[in-house]
Image (cartoon, helix red, strand yellow):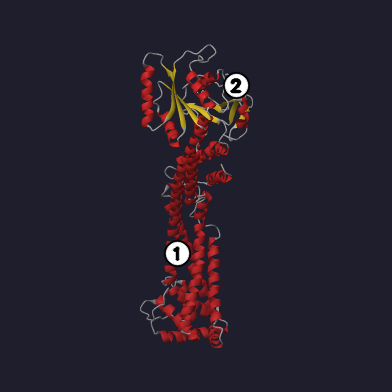
Amino acid sequence: MTETTTTTLDVVAEHLDALRLPLPLDGVEQARGEITAARRQLADHVIPRLESLDAPLLAVVGGSTGAGKSTLVNAVVGEQVTRSGAIRPTTRRPVLLHHPADEPWFAGTRILPGLARLRAAGAPAADATREGEAPGEGEGEAPVTSLELRAAEAVPQGLALLDAPDIDSVSAGNRELARQLLRAADLWIFVTTANRYADAVPWEVLRTAAERDVTVWVVMNRIPDQPGVAEELAPDLRGMLEREGIEAEHLLLVPETTLEQTGMLPADAAAELRDGLLRLAADAPARARIARRTLAGALTGLSGTAESLAAHLGAQEAEAQRLRDEVEAAFSAARDRIDAAVGDGSLLRGEVMARWQDVVGTGDFFRGVESLVSRARDRIGRALTGRTAPAVAAEQALGSSLVHVVIDECARGAERAETAWRASPAGRFLAEGQDLSRLPDGFGDEVAAAVRAWQGDVLELVRTEGSDRRSRARILSLGVNAVGVALMIVVFASTAFIPTGLEVGAGAATAVVGQKLLETVFGDEAVRRMARTAREKLTARVDALVAGRTAPFTHRLEEAGAATQDTATLEADATALAQLAARIREDAP
């Protein structure tokens, strides 16, 4: 295969390494297992086989607990090379048997790189700890991390046998290791028994083999040595295989046989299996066909896995977006309420109204706008004598009212966002152990600083707009702070422009006075432009404050890694894997 081909697989492996499915959605645990299995299969079998199609075949002997796998392997080799017994799990650590000349293919990490190599010689001890093995390794729930290598002249060159743990082992680690080894196989030798061949677990694994188009040999072991039993069981097993769509290249029958004193089967008990392996080892084209078929099937299976993972990732992205939308909706509502409070005149009450009245002397709001404006100009003009405190107090009252509104609405937005998140499993997962609705220490000071900065923007706007001599004189006659407060009053009165009548109430009348004062200084069009600019500047600062409160939520999504990949990447990987599988099938001799 070309370097480009192996590079494609390396890229797929990198994408799988980076893939995260953090949110607890339906099927996510299975999908995470598929990621791990796919990564291992690429490293254990697909990439090394693609790089060396002429390497010896790896035949993995697998099956249920007590099916007699190890006993059969010993019989094939003609000596005790792998341990068997009544203790469960019977096969504690995988044993790979190879011809001495094939050792370079297996001594390194070409296949199964995650398992350390241990070289063994002689018969396996029943209880002793093997060289390099920690006591208890491979037993119970302890993870198996090593692969025992044994050279045996009886194993034909070009073929290796791997005695795998039980697929239904009491040890979860052994069960997963058994499946990992089966995924690394070029050929499956599946061992079952006459009384357990209909068990559910073996058929689940065999269906996986069919999906991957793996070459399978099925061995029915321990058939009662009675007339007609084998003839009855064999067709039944073949029928089950056909109904499940499983193409077994060979179906081998091994009768129930008394073990010799050495614990070995009689030499002729496994003769059919041994002869079949010898014929395969001697047939290079058959080995190449099996290697390519299994490789193409593995790539097709990985293509399907990539498509499945793309769907799961799409669900993760959709759920992450839904959670973002909930945050956006909660804070958008908070933002709308701030806008309403700023624009509907509701801030022009209480302390704010009293302080503004101190500035313009408009205690009676229903005696005519013109007289009010005239008296307001006179009163503000007298402030030049040093009585500027009322304008400053009005400015502070306006700022304080706005600060309270922003803080309250941000708190409400955060509470609503967290409540929405906790209504779904994914949101609860992200909110677990977090206090997302709590406003951070110093947030009040941050809001107050932003409001003061906006008020500074308004005063600067007044100075800039009043730069011509005529306007500057009028501003100086009234005072920059007073003119600035008048502009703030207008901004707080309405997002559009306020009506000129006073029938709408005292708040609007207050804004009318401010508007008329501004018009005497700048003119009608300039006032509209200034009010719009001041409102835009306020909007920008409030937007920044509210957006800052969404950060704890968005950070949780980012920390969880809910968007580390995109579905298009995985879909492209699926296409590339399927195309590679097709090429391998087309190139088969």
Q: Which residue is mark 2?
A: 153
Q: Mark 2 or 1 closer to N-term?
A: 2
Secondary structure state at the residue bearing disc 1: helix
- Residue 183, placed above or below residue 262: below
Q: Position of residue 65 (x, y in %)?
A: 47, 24
Q: Position of residue 561 (x, y in %)?
A: 52, 49
Query: Residue 527 vs residue 129: left or right?
Result: left
- Residue 310, placed above or below residue 226: below
Residue extending furthest toward the front: 589
**Quadrant, the N terminus:** top right
Residues under numbered marks 2 and 1 in contact, where contact means CB atoms less than 8 Å apart: no
Amino acid of disc 2: Glu
Out of 199 and 330, give the one closest to the viewer: 199
Out of 382 and 272, give the one closest to the viewer: 272
Q: Residue at horizontal 45%, vertical 59%?
A: 328
Q: Which residue is mark 1?
A: 335
Secondary structure state at the residue bearing disc 2: loop
Amino acid of disc 1: Arg
Give the class, few, some or many, for how many residues have Cα within 10 Å of label 2's Cα (few <14, many ≥20).
Answer: few
Give the class, few, some or many, for how many residues have Cα within 10 Å of label 1's Cα (few <14, many ≥20).
Answer: many
Residue extending furthest toward the top: 261
The mark found on residue 159 in the picture is none
Does residue 427 show up? Answer: no
Number of numbered discs visible in the structure rendering:
2
Disc 2 to disc 1, how far (Cα)? Answer: 80 Å
Out of 350 and 437, give the one closest to the viewer: 437
Q: Position of residue 426 (x, y in %)?
A: 45, 48
Q: Residue at horizontal 45%, vertical 62%?
A: 409
Q: Position of residue 540 (x, y in %)?
A: 50, 68
Q: From the viewer's perspective, is the residue at label 2 or at label 1 nearer?
A: 2
Query: Residue 235 vs residue 78: left or right?
Result: left
Q: Residue at horizontal 60%, vertical 32%?
A: 105
